Amino acid sequence: MDDFRVIWCFRALLAKTNPYSISIRFSNILKFIFIFDAVKNPCLLNNPALTMTVLIRSLTLLILPAFILTGCHKDEGKFTPIPEPLVKPVISFTFTGANAWAPAAVSFSNTTTHAAAYKWNFGDNHTSTEGNPVHIYAEGGTYIVKLVAAGSGGTDSSTQVLTILDAPTTLKIKSVVLTGCSFTNSWGNYWDPTSGPDIFFKITDSDTTVLYDGFALIDSNSAPAHLPLVWSLPTAYTIHDFSEYKSFKIYDYDFPDPDESMGQAGLTPETYTTAQSHYPDSIKINTADVFITLVVKWQ
């Protein structure tokens, strides 16, 4: 351009009292006409010293704010995030189901932080990579459980000790409880024409050999109001072989006629020795004819 004009307001910057404005015109030959608000008269014409002073101040006031506002960023508009610090895993876990007879299901609750992957060693040659596993210990013993956790900050491990009890070897029948039966036979007649049935029980094996005779505990002239009938055995009946079938038979005592069978239900103890059906204190053995609950003790 042949010439240009810069208008800048210096109010209260170049003078502390009266505000003013400056008009600077450059042509082929440097000419300055400064018009002050308060005086409104030319104060300078072709004054190089004052020209340079005003020019320096103008450039300073123009460049310095722009420098402050734009900053000194090399890559304008780009953001470099600060990486988060890497933290090692903090391992913590609990478990439930220990101190029980084998086979025992133990549930592990993993409360580890700062980890993304896990490996469990249950101490019985079995492992898992689940976060919260459930493990079945097949045999009794003391086991050292180790958890290894890995995360962005590295790996760490922790161990705990748990105990599983040896599986019981005997099952004792303490009581036989009759909770339901029919008081009429298959023909729809009462068991005894003139009175209620005289009910007792027997325990037999699969060959009908009598193993326990509960006649001494008979409930004479029984009626539905007598139910449940609770026969507490003076001496518990003990079973050692959990794979053997036992039959619990309910009879109506008749004399001189033979005793009449009112129904029966069977028990195979090993059915109740799994981790899912774990050594219950009472066992229900119901059929269509009789409903029986056994009160038992495992040892």
Image: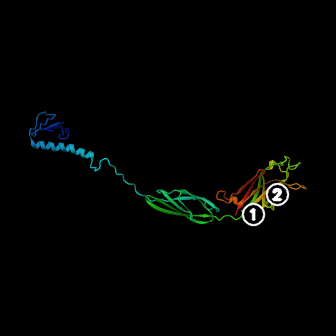
Mark 2 crowdedness (10 Å alpha carbons): few <14, some 14-19, many ≥20: some
Farthest residue to the bottom: give it.
Answer: 141
Residue under label 2, please give it.
217
Q: Residue 237 location in percent, x, y?
A: 76, 62
Q: Secondary structure at mark 1?
A: strand
**Picture quadrant of residue 62:** top left
- State how far apart marks 2 and 1 are (Cα): 18 Å
Residue under the point 24% across and 44% down: 66
Residue under the point 19% across and 45% down: 60
Counting labels gives 2
Above/below status of 154 relative to 73: below
| Quadrant showing the C terminus | bottom right
Above/below status of 267 relative to 45: below
Viewer-proximal residue, 49 or 277?
Answer: 277
Relative side of 123 to 252, left or right:
left
Which mark lies nearer to you, 2 or 1? 1
Farthest residue to the right: give it.
Answer: 256
Q: Residue 5 location in percent, x, y?
A: 16, 37
Residue under label 1, please give it.
238
Residue under the point 77% across and 58% down: 247
- Specify the amino acid type for callout 1: Thr
Q: Secondary structure at mark 2?
A: helix
Q: Residue 27 location in percent, x, y?
A: 11, 38
Q: Residue 68 location in percent, x, y?
A: 25, 46
Relative side of 37 to 214, left or right:
left
- Specify the amino acid type for callout 2: Leu
